[in-house]
Image (cartoon, rainbow, N blue to C red):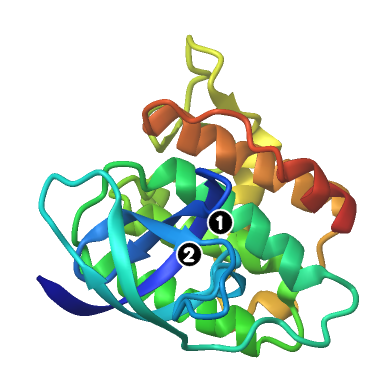
Amino acid sequence: MLFKTQGIVLGTSKYSDTYSISQVFTRDFGRVSYLVPKRGRKSKIKASLFYPLSMLDMQVEHVPLRDIQRLKEVECRLPVYEGDTDMTKWSISFFLSEFLSRVLRETGRDEWLFTYLENSVETLHAATHGVANFHLAFLFGLSRCMGIYPNMDTYRTGAYFDLLNGEFVQKQPLHPHYLSKSLSADLTLIRRINYANMHLFRLSKNDRNTIIDYLLAYYRLHLYDFPPLKSLEVLREMF
């Protein structure tokens, strides 16, 4: 049966000499693997549309329990980041697409999550300043959709943030997964970053690297099988 849906590309990998497999998070079916032809003038499906975080309008076959679904027609909803010669948005897109491909492994239909991703990608496309902080705002916001948003109401001066339990505590935890008092205090400020105000936060490269490290550590503690991200080092160099 044919369906019309919208999707956000998470990543693409080689399948054969003539086809690739693209992982797409769709509005109607959650994460789906699609067969994408690599070349061919007669094909209605262009491999060039499947860049990381590309937003697509798709007509698809969807057969329950089939591992790889088929595409019938695909159109791009938003243009690729043309003109971004500093590669800023490209590096963020590659990092977030790899991150999402690890986080959204077994996700089914989730309208709230799809809408958050959709709005986020549209914001990244349109942003003209403050882009260097986008991935920090994204990860904080996504934790709500994933049901792991930390309890920020428990902070008191001198508290530690317990990464394992997602809350502030007054005594140093007995396990190693916590932030120092200084970083815990900083967390109460950093968590205020959002898409509307991200340009107001003047952070150094070291600040961003520290923040992304403990945000990823938090996700790794709360989500199953979260391996190191290859694109993280590129992001570190960019910002």
Q: What amino acid type is highlighted by mark number 2? A: Val
| Residue 218, percent from left and from top | 50, 36
Q: Residue at x 89, y 50 (%)?
A: 237
Please give the residue where the numbered disc 1 appears in the rendered image: 97
Residue 92 sits in quarter? bottom right
Query: Would you say 60 lies left or right of 215 here?
Result: left
Q: What amino acid type is highlighted by mark number 1? A: Ser
Residue 152 seen from this side: yes
Q: Are marks 1 and 2 in contact (CB under 8 Å)?
A: yes
- Taking depth in this image into account, of 132 and 164 the one nearest to the observer is 132
Residue 180 sits in quarter? top right
- Taking depth in this image into account, of 53 and 200 the one nearest to the observer is 53
| Residue 130, percent from left and from top | 74, 78
Please give the residue where the numbered disc 2 appears in the rendered image: 9
Q: Residue furthest top?
A: 174
* Other residues around mark 1 within 10 Å, as few (<14) / some (14–19) / many (≥20): many
When the figure is inspected, residue 106 is found, relative to residue 180, above or below; the finding is below
Query: Would you say 162 lies left or right of 115 here?
Result: right
**Local SS, label 1:** helix
- The mark that comes first in sequence, 1 or 2, is 2
Q: Residue at x 72, y 43 (%)?
A: 232
| Residue 103, percent from left and from top | 42, 44
When the figure is inspected, residue 34 is found, relative to residue 156, above or below; the finding is below
Q: Residue at x 61, y 79 (%)?
A: 124
- Taking depth in this image into account, of 28 and 218 the one nearest to the observer is 28
Query: Would you say 115 lies left or right of 215 here?
Result: left
When the figure is inspected, residue 156 is found, relative to residue 76, above or below; the finding is above
- Report the quarter where the C terminus lies: bottom right
Q: Residue at x 76, y 86 (%)?
A: 82
**Local SS, label 2:** strand
